[in-house]
Amino acid sequence: MSAETKPIYFTFATAGHVDHGKTSVLRALTGIDPDRLKEEKQRQMTTDIGFAHLNFPQEADGTQLVIGFIDVPGHGKFLKNMLAGVGGIQMALLVVAADEGPMPQTVSHAKILSLLGVRKALVVLTKIDVADQARQDSVENSVRDLLRRYQIECMGIARVSNTQNTGFENLKEKLRAVVKDVERPSANGGAILPVDRVFSKTGYGVVVTGTLVSGQLAVGDSISIEPGEIKGRIRGLETFKKQIQNATAGQRLAVNISLKENKPLVRGQVVANWNVPVVTTIVARIEQLGLSEERVKAADIEDQPVRFYHGTAECFGHLRWCQAIEAEQALIAQIVLTDPVVAEPGDRFVIRYGDEGITGGVVLVTNRPRWMTRNKLNVFADQLVRRDYNAAVDFYLENMTQPAAKKESLSSFLPVAERERAFVACTQAGTLLQESNFIINAKRAQDVKQRIQKVVSVKAEPDSEPPEFSIESVRMKVSNTLDRQLFQHFLKELSDAGLISRNGDKISQMVEKAAVSPVQTELANKVLEILNATICLEIDEICKVLKTDRKLVQSTLQALSKQELACIVDHDYASSAAAIRKAHACLAKIWETKKEISPSEFRESLGTSRKYAMALLAYFDNKLITRRLNNTRVLIKAPKD
């Protein structure tokens, strides 16, 4: 493959009854024997998944089509291996023998393909050398009916003979044609590679193989293997025995991993380069497929053990409950798994129950929150089944216990493709607000602001300022779980609207003030003149100098404080805003050189008495600018430039 070649990768899985020739078709088509186990060659029967690939000639535009094939076993005994092979696959190669037609495992495989979301299949009619034309036509019609029953589009039928090696050029052309109608897996977002095989190679170490179902991987990437929280780095990538530096969604890969700790890897884990969700409980829609006699009823599967298949993973679980909802007459169920799996909303799965029961569905919710009762879940699931994701976002944020949530919480019920769209739509509709990484329903936000106003609405004494509350104490009363940054956002909105008054880290009720008299203005100017001449002074001393009542001086200082011109210090003292800034700068200078602040050093640096220095330190402690540690102070907040 030249440097200018732009490969386009697709992966197909075979499907069909045992001994209908799936492996022989791939061997004749690609020249590669996908049977890799000794017992498979001896028994001439595929028992585990195998792999092959086909390179097409380079196109005029420089692109080259590369199709990978996963060969799956057809015997019912090895159904779990078949499920591991088709997880995450978009297209299937359904192989049917012309002499026998669709057999039990053909039907079973078609049903599984449909449950896993495979909506297109190319049919290969084998053994045409032992069936006449009429028989071949009859089998073709039966296969088309089978696919139609399970809502799988038949993308064409190729007739081949493995023994006579005929029909394979026609099959190649049909493959080339059908992939043009298949949507390529998304290379955007995080990488996910479900592991279907693990082995060690001398000189390389651990190697895992799988189909990269989304995202991209590159040599040198840091990755994690989940479940298990196993960290590692990609040492090498290989696709169909060719070493590469970068891989994109749709490729079959062998990934050589350097692990940070010696933990065993197994089929069913996932290689990812992002924080994938690992879950043990899911709420899902159970699919009802096919003819009326095959439709699953809630009573058939409720409250019984199941085997759960997702991606390449298999584990036991218990289907706790199952019930019908109004939307599309769907069944919803909660499944509790014995082992954790990597799963997201929108993912498809298969479950086996009883002796031979097979069904499956779509994940709706991962890790159902405790506040979501069955009644609420019915409403929520109805919205999700109808794909009314905007309504689902509103419902979730309105009903959850906490007033706000992190934006990532939406990923517990929104499919990847819908997350940003639903978020933007709800934001534009005004039903959702965001501040930093937190989101809140508009109705809940209004409720929070009303509760803030209620907390600070305390009746004040006549002719006195309304009482002030620390911001943190108000937050604790309104909701002790509300993010501080989001709470500050609400305070700003209330302050800008003139509904509350802010004074540093204090807030109070906004009251209508009477016009300021010339006498009050004159008093404020005299108080400021006194404070500007010193670092700190007793309020009683100001009263003596001005020969004015303490109550009047106190209210004047409160007004100056709200204007950020002066500060009341440790209840009985006052300082100008300039003096406070000077004192704060002294603290920072001492801290920068000694990393601790003693009262004596602060007093000397400020050039004042111990009485005033201690009052100022108490003020800074109360403002959380400093913190007392034994007999010294630690600086928490640096002064603003």
Image: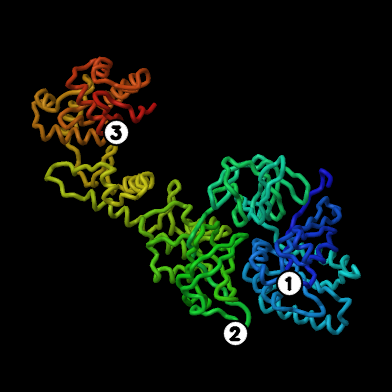
Residue 204 in sight in this render: yes
CA gap between label 3 and label 1 equals 71 Å
Q: Is residue 448 above or below residue 75?
A: above
Tell me the number on the disc at residue 16.
1
CA gap between label 3 and label 2 equals 71 Å
Q: Residue at x 83, y 73 (%)?
A: 126
Left or right of residue 426: residue 580: left
Q: Residues within 10 Å of mark 3 (few under 14, many from 20)?
A: some
CA gap between label 2 and label 1 equals 23 Å
* Residue type, numbered disc 3: Leu
Tell me the number on the disc at residue 291.
none
Q: Give the residue at mark 3.
A: 624
| Sequence-first tag of 3 and 2 | 2
x then y, percent, for residue 21: 80, 70
| Sequence-first tag of 2 and 1 | 1
Query: Quarter holding the C terminus?
Result: top left
**Which quadrant of the figure has residue 10?**
bottom right
Q: Residue at x 30, y 51 (%)?
A: 479
Left or right of residue 391: residue 153: right
Q: Residues within 10 Å of mark 2 (few under 14, many from 20)?
A: few
Tag in front: 3 or 1: 1
* Residue type, numbered disc 2: Glu
Q: Give the residue at mark 2.
A: 293
* Residue type, numbered disc 1: Gly
Tag in front: 3 or 2: 2
x then y, percent, for residue 3: 81, 43
Front-lying residue, 409 or 265: 265
Left or right of residue 32: residue 351: left
Label 3 with label 1: CB-CB less than 8 Å? no
Front-lying residue, 490 or 196: 196
Q: Secondary structure at mark 1?
A: loop
Q: Is residue 32 above or below residue 100?
A: above
